[in-house]
Image (cartoon, rainbow, N blue to C red):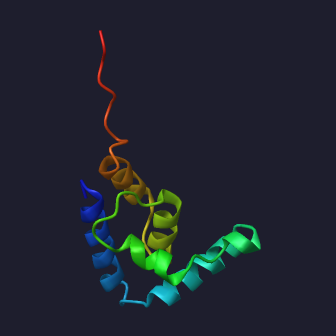
């Protein structure tokens, strides 16, 4: 998972392992979990296409909070996915030292 395309491919594999739920089902699960967390009504349920886009190659960015919610909706721990997101987004690398 060193690139966003790799992250998307792994996310697709996780979806398959979770029984291949529809993107609509994943979005609904996210909405239910966000309701429990007290997220405001207008921000609870992502669109089906928004969820689908996280699984698509060619992305230039993926929202880490949505990624975490998708991973939870698929029954996995989001912590390693957050770390992989940082690495794939170039945020997990130390800044170069300037002298």
Confirm whether residue 24 shows in the render. Answer: yes
Question: Which is more toward the observer, 45 or 81?
Answer: 45
Which residue sits at x=31%, y=37%? 93
* Image side of residue 21 versus residue 94, left or right: right
What percent of the width, then of the height, locates residue 34? 65, 71
Residue 55 point in image, percent of width and height: 35, 74
Give the camera-side residue of 76 and 54.
54
Question: In front: 16, or 46?
Answer: 46
Residue 86's place in the image compared with 14, above or below, is above
How many dots with numbers? 0
- Looking at the image, which residue is at 28% across and 66% down? 58
Q: Is residue 84 left or right of residue 30?
A: left
Q: Quadrant of residue 78?
A: bottom left
In the depicted structure, whether residue 15 falls above or below residue 11: below
| Image spot of residue 17 (x, y percent) | 31, 83
Quadrant in the rendering for residue 96: top left
Q: Considering only vertical position in the picture, is 37 above or below 75?
A: above
Position of the C terminus, as image quadrant, is top left
* Residue at the spot 28% in from the left edge and 77% down from the top edge: 13
- At x 34%, y 28%, the residue is 95
Q: Position of residue 76 (x, y in %)?
A: 42, 71
Using residue 30 as the reference point, say whether residue 41 is left or right of it: right
Q: Quadrant of the N terminus?
A: bottom left
State whether residue 74 appears in this view: no
Left or right side of 37 for 12? left
């Amino acid at each position: 998972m060193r690139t966003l395309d790799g992250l998307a491919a792994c996310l697709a594999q996780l979806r398959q392992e979770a029984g291949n739920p529809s993107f609509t089902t994943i979005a609904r699960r996210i909405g239910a979990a966000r309701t429990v967390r007290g997220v405001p009504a207008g921000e609870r349920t992502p669109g089906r296409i928004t969820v689908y886009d996280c699984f698509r190659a060619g992305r230039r960015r993926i929202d880490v909070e949505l990624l975490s919610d998708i991973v939870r909706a698929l029954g996995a721990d989001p912590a390693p996915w957050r770390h992989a997101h940082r690495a794939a987004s170039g945020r997990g690398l130390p800044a170069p030292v300037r002298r």
